[in-house]
Amino acid sequence: MGTRAAPADRVAPERSPVWLWRRRVLIALTAYVALSYLAAWFVLHPVTSPVRLPEYLATSKPVDVTFHSSDGTRLSGWWFRAPGAVGSIVLCHGAFENRMGVIDCVPRLLGARLNVLSFDFRARGRSGGSQSTLGKRETEDVLAGVRWVKERPEATALPIGGMGFSQGAAAAIMAAAQCDDLAAIVADSPYSSLDKAVDRHL
């Protein structure tokens, strides 16, 4: 009987260059897909800061409000009333923020005798919704905010403006194109193309 080679004596079969190339391609593709998925997930589900009213705005006594976007998503915000108001502003935060990202604008707007609705876009802050859409559905959120302001007894006869930053600026511009009730827009750093904005974030 012949002797059987011990496991230590066995030689591993040599892999062909084609097999090695295919293995490397498969690993690269798997890593690419996994990283792309994670990047997209974090863009659509970023962590934002807690929502807390700053002490310097406590005397303004904002009202906690909720209203709903066109698809039923519940939106949450603060309504600040300005004494002797001459207009109202819907204040729109950026993509990776909530209302706290623009809260420093409120004292100046109130000082200019403007009521302020500062709210959280969907999937941000205290609002409902499972994910951000980087402006696509947020435009509907702005329109919902405008409708809510228009129905306020103290703001019915006053002009309404929008003020936004980044994604909020783009959403306000797109909302103004669909809504005659937005008399003016202040847009800080809006994007000109949603596709380009998505590419940049990813």
Image (cartoon, rainbow, N blue to C red):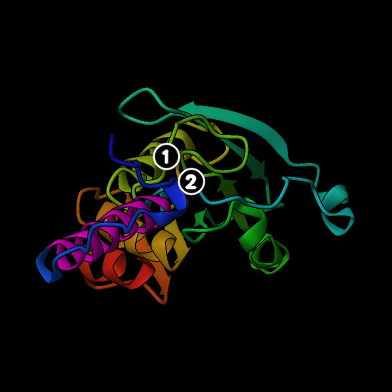
| Mark 2: few/some/many CA within 10 Å (<14, 14-19, 20+) | some
**Residue occupying image coordinates x 29% and y 59%:** 27
**Residue occupying image coordinates x 46% and y 64%:** 164
Is residue 149 one of those drawn in magenta?
no
Where residue 190 appears, x then y in whole percent?
A: 36, 72
Left/right placement of residue 85 relative to residue 197 reads right
Q: Identify the image quadrant of the C terminus.
A: bottom left
**Farthest bottom residue?**
189
Where residue 16 appears, x then y in whole percent?
A: 14, 66
Q: Nearer the viewer, residue 4 or 126?
A: 4
Disc 1 secondary structure class:
loop
The disc, 2 or 1, on the residue closer to the chain's N-terminal end is 2
Where residue 178 appears, x then y in whole percent?
A: 20, 49
Where residue 165 appears, x then y in whole percent?
A: 47, 67
Pointers 2 and 1 in contact (C-beta within 8 Å) = yes
Which residues fall within the magenta stretch? Answer: 19-39
The residue carrying mark 1 is: 131
| Mark 2 residue type | His
Q: Which of the 4 quarters of the picture holds residue 194?
A: bottom left
Cα–Cα span, label 2 and label 1: 6 Å
Is residue 36 one of those drawn in magenta?
yes
| Mark 1 residue type | Gln
The residue carrying mark 2 is: 45
Disc 2 secondary structure class:
loop
**Residue occupying image coordinates x 59% and y 51%:** 98
**Farthest front residue?**
1
Q: Nearer the viewer, residue 149 or 155?
A: 149
Q: Is residue 150 above or below residue 172?
A: above
Q: Identify the image quadrant of the N terminus.
A: top left
Q: Is residue 132 above or below residue 163?
A: above
